[in-house]
Image (cartoon, rainbow, N blue to C red):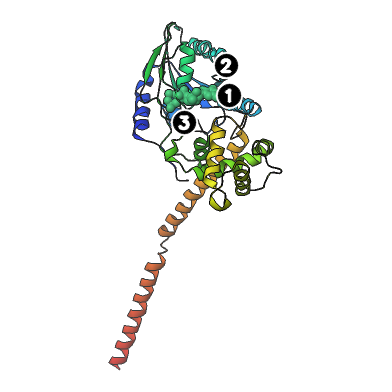
Amino acid sequence: MGLQWFPGHMHKALKEIKESLDQVDILIEVLDARIPYSSENPEIAKIRGDKPCLKVLNKYDLADPKLTADWQAHLETERSVQTLTTASNNPGNSKQIINIVRSICAKKNASVKSIKAMITGIPNVGKSTLINILADRIVAKTGNEPAVTKSQQRVNLGDGIILFDTPGVLWPKLENPNSIYRLAALGAVKNTAMEFDDVGFYAADYLIKAYPEVMTERFKLEELPSTELAFLEAAAKTRGALMAGGRVNLHKICEVLLTELQAGKLGQITFETPGMVNIEKKQMEDAAAKKIADKQKRKQRFKDGSLTPDKKDRKEKRTEKREAQSKRMKKDRK
Ligand SMILES: Nc1nc2c(ncn2[C@@H]2O[C@H](COP(=O)(O)OP(=O)(O)OP(=O)(O)O)[C@@H](O)[C@H]2O)c(=O)[nH]1
Ligand SMILES: [Mg+2]
């Protein structure tokens, strides 16, 4: 899927985040607990410098608890960042953010009387919902679709903390193809910017391998098919996603699968593990290294004087022509 969803408002929002960064004491990056790696914005990491950062794994209620624990351990040990899990159905827990922010800022500088914190994250991850929880009132608009917040908004919590809500941003170049699918499968990409069928097939392939029992039960299958296509066909039959003549409607069943996944109806599902991501990163590094090595090999060939086949042909033909001409001349002279 050739998806790059980076509309104008995100470009502007990212620029504004960069511009306001100097004014804030700490960044709160909201990640999707179901995809902590794919929902982390590399652009934010680039511009953050050494500004303190708290990583909040939100929508914890929808994620696989065992894998969330693995992710927290991974992020905290390997990356030395502080993490916290939050869910909108547990506001008491989300409020810990305030204490953590205070203690991080206290370590950094003595004055914690007035703290400015900026909340960033991918579209639809729950930034505005979190701000409403922390403010104890509805101050930010929320909605179950990406790009609800369109501009930066400041919210004074009244106890010396000012929060900046920001529009959800992705990044201009999504390097890992798996991340694109995961972001789309979990609702961070506008429906009109993605191919439901492509994303549905990707999700089905992962889910039948990672959560076979959940999928068998949810779609009332007697046994789990071994491929995503066979699974979608079987699920289409049990769910009545059929066209005239009884043919299965794959588009419809992909839509059903993604809607139920995003609504949390499949249960607590996580779409990536630290182990999977390490393998993917290695594959991307190897591919990038191969590209560089190939380019260098090509350059070396030119340097060594080896000519392109086309130029070589022309040179050989010229030499042949010259030799034939000189032979002819010698013959004429005789
Ligand atoms: N299940 C669950 N749903 C959540 C949670 N947090 C937010 N949501 C839902 O996710 C949707 C998006 O929430 P928002 O707060 O608007 O997300 P946002 O990050 O501000 O989105 P943009 O402004 O579009 O970038 C809403 O339907 C929320 O009700 C959570 O912890 N668990
Ligand atoms: Mg918002």
Query: Looking at the picture, how far across and down is residue 158, in whole percent?
Result: 42, 6
Task: Say whether marks 1 and 2 touch (CB < 8 Å).
Answer: yes
Report the amino acid beneath label 2. Asn
- Quick one: SS at disc 2? loop
In the image, 10: left or right of 41? Answer: left
Q: Is 61 rendered above or below residue 174? A: above
Query: Looking at the picture, how far across and down is residue 268, in whole percent?
Result: 62, 29
Nearer to me, 150 or 109: 150
Categorize mark 2 by other alpha carbons within 10 Å: few (<14), some (14-19), many (20+). Answer: few
In the image, 76: left or right of 121? Answer: right
Q: Is residue 58 visible?
A: no
Location of mark 1 (residue): 60
Image quarter where the C terminus lies is bottom left
The label shown at residue 90 is 2
Task: Say whether marks 3 and 2 touch (CB < 8 Å).
Answer: no
Q: State yes or no: Cβ of the residue under disc 1 lies below 8 Å from any atom of ligand 1.
A: yes
- Quick one: SS at disc 3? loop
Location of mark 3 (residue): 41
